Amino acid sequence: MKFYFGGYYLIKPRKADFGSTKNKRFLTCSSCINDTLIDTWAISWATPIEHQIKELREKFGISVEKRLEIQNWADKKLEENRIGWHQVFSDLETVNEYGDKFFSHILEKEILQILFSEEERKFFLDEFTPEKKEYGTLGIYDNLKRKIIEEESDEEEFIGFDLIGVELGGDFHSFHCHDIANQLIDEFGIELNKYGLIKEIANHKEIITYMNDEENGFEPVPWFLVKVKKKIKSN
């Protein structure tokens, strides 16, 4: 099966703090579960949320001066379509540059890539096509529009599948946000790996239909199955 590039994410894993997932770590790109190291605060014309600024300073050691430096860099990369709205990178070179330049002091960061099957790609593009030309597009949308087929690389490894529910603004949830891993295990016989991701999917259509049925109580947003790859860290 072909998979298409949806984007790179730079995250700092953190322990979950709720339900049966408490104190566990999952390698998902969802900012509900892990810390994302780029967000709206990195764009000069976006209005930062006060708690983001506090978190940048206290958790990541990013001063006001450093944030302005990041914004200057990010504004240019946004114009060049090397990053997209609002947490996603369009190529490995750019996410590497960003991580090395601004977050080299965060040693436990991870670079993750998400990929969509042809069916999921079309579903995403249908769901997130702007209603008007003047409306902006999501970074994932722009990347999928380019129709870049997954490439094999010695720099990355496949680490499993995630189920993500995408908001209009580009944020997305993981199935872990709803603490439903055991429910999916019972319903569909899935198996999770050491990263907290799904090992393999034999009945993906049934699972996607299940996730997109609002009567099952999940976030009322479009849900997608994505393949996840991780950049291998050099020794």
Image (spheres, helix red, strand yellow):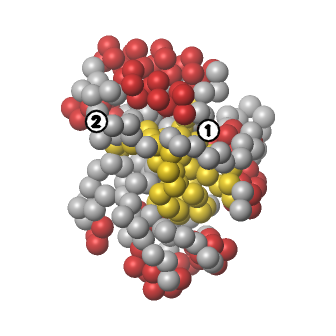
The answer to whether marks 2 and 1 mark residues whose Cβ atoms lie closer than 8 Å is no
| Amino acid found under the numbered disc labelled 1 | Gly
**x, y percent for residue 90:** 60, 34
Q: Is residue 54 left or right of residue 69?
A: left
Residue 108: assigned label:
none
**Under tag 1, what secondary structure?**
helix
Q: Nearer the viewer, residue 106 or 199?
A: 199
Residue 139: assigned label:
1
Taking the spot 62% from the left edge, 38% from the top edge, the residue there is: 139
**x, y percent for residue 156:** 51, 45
* Residue 98, quarter of the rendered image: top left
Taking the spot 69% from the left edge, 38% from the top edge, the residue there is: 142
Q: Nearer the viewer, residue 207 or 118?
A: 118
- Is residue 180 something that shows in the picture? no
User: Quick one: label 2 or label 1, which is nearer the N terminus?
Assistant: 2
Q: Is residue 204 left or right of residue 55?
A: right
**x, y percent for residue 55:** 27, 35
Q: Up-down: is 177 above or below 146?
A: below
Mark 2, Cα crowd under 10 Å, few <14 / some 14-19 / many 20+, is few
Q: Nearer the viewer, residue 136 or 88?
A: 88
- Residue that badge 2 annotates: 107
